[in-house]
Image (cartoon, rainbow, N blue to C red):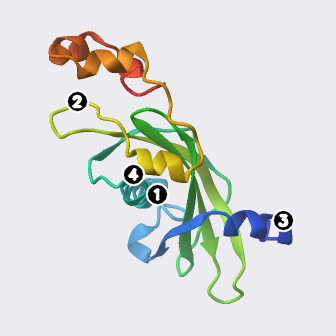
Amino acid sequence: MKDVTKKNLDAMHSMDHLGTYPVKKSDLGFHGNLFGGQLLKWIDSSAAAYAMQLCDTPRMVTVSIEKCFFEKPAREGSLIKIYGKPSSLGTTSVTLYLEARSHSVYTGQQWVVLKTHIQFASFNGASSLFSLNPVFIFLLNVPPPALSPLFIRYLGPTSTTLVNSASIFDLFDL
């Protein structure tokens, strides 16, 4: 079991703490470990709230969750602590790096259970993309991305037709 060392303790403090969840008997799978689907649910909801907070909009939707490798099991009675930080920014989307760590309430030790990237896109509520808050882009010290011709198509009067003919990869800066 890999414990939190000085090196990865510094990395942990560079990320924001997004949430803590106790592992209960109802969260366990067949082998007495935390059920992976429950962990993904916690990660997605924590990351969505974080994306909304960073981008100053409640209209963020999950676009993709990168490959998830379950590195260590989590057992009943431990705490799952979720940490995250922004890793990239598109015109209409933000990608977050997330780690879920199991925290022993007896020793205070933590170890990584899962690492992944989750991408969120901003919508105006009518299935149309809209740009992220420029203040968020400024706070990340990332120059505002140039509007791609693809994105500009969505802003035009025929956006419904163009969105319906575009691929899902075109919609989210993938």
Tell me the CA gap for discs 3 and 1: 24 Å
Left/right placement of residue 172 relative to residue 95 reads: left
The residue nearer to you, when weighing 16 against 156, is 156
Query: Which of the marked residues, 3 or 1, is nearer the chain's N terminus?
Result: 3
Choose between 33 and 166: the one closer to the eye.
166
On the image, the x and y values in percent for residue 165 come to: 25, 9
Q: Nearer the viewer, mark 3 or mark 4?
A: 4
Position of 91 relative to 7 (above/below): above
Callout in the foreground (2, 1): 2
Q: Residue at x 46, y 26 (%)?
A: 173
Earlier-in-chain disc, 2 versus 1: 1
Mark closer to the chain start, 2 or 3: 3
Q: CA distance from mark 2 to mark 1?
A: 25 Å
Q: Which residue is denoted by mark 2 in the rendering?
A: 128
| Kind of residue sitting beneath label 2 | Ser
* Image location of residue 46, percent across then percent down: 42, 61
Name the residue at 39% across, 60% down.
Answer: 53
Quarter the N terminus occupies: bottom right
Mark 1 lies on a secondary structure that is: helix
Residue that label 3 marks: 7
Q: Earlier in the sequence, mark 2 or mark 4?
A: 4
Q: Position of residue 64 (x, y in %)?
A: 44, 37
Residue of label 4: 55
